[in-house]
Image: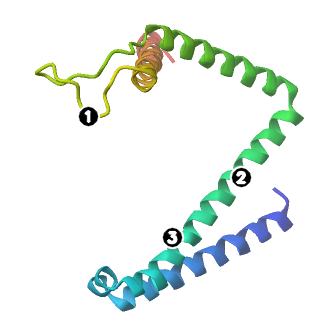
Amino acid sequence: MNSKIAKILSLASGLIGLIAIYFLVRIIMEGDDAVKESLELQNSLVSPFVSFARVILIITAIIAIVFSLWNLVRQPKLLKKTLISLAGLAVLLMISYAMASDAAVTNVSGNVIKDGEAGPVSKWVSTGIWYSMILGGIGLGFFLWDFVKSLVSTK
């Protein structure tokens, strides 16, 4: 990495750390009970801290996405592999959607639970469960394959 960029990043992360420490020290100085009981203290201490953390999270996510996309654009082979992988995930999502049920969600006694009515929400929840199960099964399969391969391998 370029030493200029490394210095800038070090200074930026140090500044972010100092701001976070400032907020933390202010909250600690007031004490837990005082902050819990006083809405005014919450608005003056905790809310800015949460807003700062939210802004840092959003900026970090945007930077990560932009640099990832930039890297994909600069490397066509990597872009092709990524698009093939995303297409595979889309196929698994379609399979999960086809396997999903849109029936009402019931409890043990057969009563429909609150907000568990039949319909599109139930269908998508079921799709998410099937999608997780399929991906988990694939992951477990690769784990077992690697485990068996390492047992057989003499290296």
Q: Residue furthest left?
A: 109
For disc 1, the neighbor class at 10 Å (few under 14, some 14 to 19, many from 20) is few
Which mark is on residue 62?
2
- Which amino acid does the dot numbered 2 rest on? Ile
Gap between marks 2 and 1 measured at Cα: 37 Å
Q: State how far apart marks 1 and 3 are (Cα).
A: 32 Å
Q: x, y percentage for residue 10? A: 71, 70
Q: Is residue 46 left or right of residue 1?
A: left
Q: Quadrant of the N terminus?
A: bottom right
**Label 3 – label 2 distance at C-alpha:** 18 Å
Residue at image point 56% right, 70% down: 51
Residue for badge 3: 50
Secondary structure under the numbered disc 2 in the rendered image:
helix
Circle 3: is it few (<14), some (14-19), or many (20+) Cα within 10 Å? few
User: Image height check: is 97 above or below 12?
Assistant: above
- Mark closer to the observer (2, 1): 1
Q: Residue at 51% x, 70% y: name it.
A: 50
Q: Earlier in the sequence, mark 3 or mark 2?
A: 3
Q: How crowded is the residue under tag 2: few (<14 C-alpha within 10 Å), some, or many (20+)? A: few
Task: Give the mark nearer the N terminus: 1 vs 3.
Answer: 3
Type of amino acid at the residue the image marks with label 3: Val
Q: Is residue 2 left or right of residue 48?
A: right
* Color theme of the render: rainbow
Query: Which is nearer the eye, 104 or 84?
Result: 104
Circle 1: element type: loop
Tell me which amino acid carries mark 1: Lys
Callout 2 touching callout 1 (CB < 8 Å): no
Q: Residue at x 38, y 13 (%)?
A: 101
Mark linked to residue 114 = 1
- Secondary structure type for disc 3: helix
